[in-house]
Image (cartoon, rainbow, N blue to C red):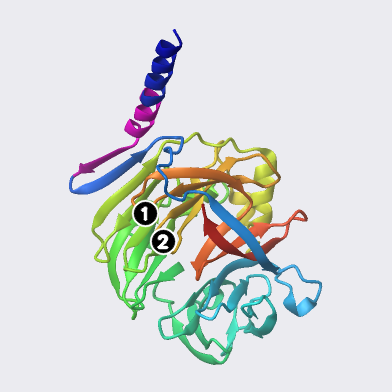
């Protein structure tokens, strides 16, 4: 009897494992590899899947005025570990060394050389120059990493070109507002280093017409994209749990998908989001209408070993915790865990993230990373 029971339990375990493995599918559709993942992670087969984070320091909520960041929106890290944090409200960049110590402030509000207005993005170029999206002045502002102003480049001929990312050759990917024959859309486009249009990844229709009648879903303006170290483009529209990988020439090569249950949106959630939307002075917040459910995810990044880390909207136990979904370098869903962190940059076994404090401030944190 015991032997039969053992055999039965063994067969049940095998069938359960087989079922989980079979739930993950890889197929090819029109020359594109599609990795279909189930809602729950696939069981580990001995590879490290557990992310261990040890906090090194945080910046942005100092009581010293020059070190404070009123509203951090973007930040970058150079090869020496120096952190450049864009403060949207203060219209400047705060610089901190590899130990988190404040170094200097770059830029100030205005329209003259070295001045910026409503900055909407920050990059370090292959030439080690600091590039600021100076949206209010409709230009790109360039500085040395030490803070010396270099030049301005006008983008007045490219309507609302924002959210730029850059590859190792200086090509950029960004979102541009397009008006053609009365139709309006946002297009995700790749440009060369001189901002000549190369190709379009996706076009998103913009149906908002009358601010007195029409409403906007703020998540319609959220697309996630970046270049990897080889110049491939990772692109996702979070309306669906799908991440597309394009070649540097714009050919779709791979899709990573996952089944998910949308998180319901509460009034408290809406209040938090509204608090973070910048007040541009023309009543933009009154034009918003939020959906009943969150999109599939908020953001994603690649670590130094090619793992894809996706910050979902699915709430987890603990204040401000959501689930981070972990995919291996092949796109297989291997783990999930609750966390407050919003990973942004992985460099030299360090992870740099945004995190909300208990007081509601957004700070930058650096963690030492290991996997088990």
Q: Residue at x 40, y 15 (%)?
A: 8
Instruction: Name the residue located 43 percent from the left edge and 77 percent from the top edge.
Output: 155
Q: Residue at (37%, 25%) from the top-left corner?
A: 14
- Circle 1 sits on which residue? 329
Numbered-mark total: 2
Looking at this view, name the residue that lies furthest to the top: 1
Where is residue 332 drawn, in percent x and y?
A: 37, 45
Judge left or right: residue 44 versus residue 109. Answer: left
Residue 34's label in the rendered image is none
Q: Are marks 1 and 2 in contact (CB under 8 Å)?
A: yes
Q: Kindly tell me whether residue 185 is visible in this rendering.
A: no
In this rendering, the answer to whether 94 lies above or below 200 is: below
Is residue 17 found inside the magenta-colored segment of the image? yes
Q: Residues within 10 Å of mark 2 (few under 14, many from 20)?
A: few
Decide which of 191, 146 is in the foreground and name it: 146
Left or right: where 154 falls relative to 252: right
State whether residue 100 appears in this view: yes
- Dividing the picture into quadrants, the one containing residue 175 is bottom left
Residue 265 pos. (x, y %):
61, 38
Tell which of 178 and 196 is nearer to you.
Answer: 196
Q: Residue 267, percent across and down?
A: 68, 39
- In the picture, which quadrant includes the N terminus? top left
Q: CA distance from mark 1 to mark 2?
A: 7 Å
Task: Mark 1 or mark 2: name the one nearer the start of the chain.
Answer: 2
Mark 1: few/some/many CA within 10 Å (<14, 14-19, 20+): few
Side of 194 where 309 appears, left or right: right
First to last magenta residue range: 15-29
- Per the image, the residue denoted by label 2 is 305
């Amino acid at each position: 009897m015991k032997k039969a029971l053992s055999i039965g339990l063994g067969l049940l375990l095998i069938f359960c494992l087989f079922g989980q493995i079979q739930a993950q599918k890889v197929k090819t559709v029109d020359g594109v590899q599609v990795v279909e993942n189930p809602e729950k992670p696939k069981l580990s087969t001995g590879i490290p899947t557990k992310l261990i984070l040890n906090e090194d320091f945080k910046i942005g909520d100092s009581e010293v005025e020059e070190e404070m960041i009123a509203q951090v929106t973007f930040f970058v890290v150079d090869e020496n570990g120096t952190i450049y944090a864009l403060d949207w409200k203060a219209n400047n960049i705060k610089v901190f060394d590899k130990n988190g110590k404040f170094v200097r402030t770059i830029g100030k509000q205005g329209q003259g050389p070295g001045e910026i207005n409503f900055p909407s993005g920050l990059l370090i170029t292959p030439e080690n120059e600091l590039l600021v999206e100076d949206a209010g002045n409709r230009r790109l502002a360039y500085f040395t990493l030490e803070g010396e102003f270099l030049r301005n480049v006008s983008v007045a001929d490219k309507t609302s070109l924002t959210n730029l990312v850059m590859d190792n050759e200086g090509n950029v990917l960004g979102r541009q507002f397009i008006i053609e024959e009365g139709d309006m859309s946002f297009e995700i486009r790749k440009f060369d280093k001189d901002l000549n249009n190369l190709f379009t990844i996706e076009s998103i229709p913009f149906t908002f017409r009358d601010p007195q009648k029409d409403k906007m879903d703020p998540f319609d303006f959220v697309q996630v994209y970046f270049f990897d170290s080889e110049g491939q483009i990772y692109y996702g529209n979070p309306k669906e749990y799908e991440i597309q990988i394009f070649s540097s020439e714009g050919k779709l090569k791979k899709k990573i998908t996952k089944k998910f249950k949308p998180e319901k949106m509460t009034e408290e959630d809406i209040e938090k989001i509204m608090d973070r939307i910048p007040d541009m002075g023309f009543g933009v917040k009154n034009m918003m209408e939020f959906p009943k459910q969150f999109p599939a995810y908020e953001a994603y990044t690649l670590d130094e070993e090619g793992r894809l880390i996706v910050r979902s909207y699915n709430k987890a136990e603990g204040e401000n915790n959501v689930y981070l979904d972990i995919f291996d370098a092949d796109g297989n869903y291997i783990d999930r865990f609750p966390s407050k962190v919003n990973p942004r940059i992985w460099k030299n076994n360090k992870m740099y993230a945004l995190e909300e404090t208990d007081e509601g401030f957004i700070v930058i944190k650096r963690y030492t990373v290991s996997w088990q």
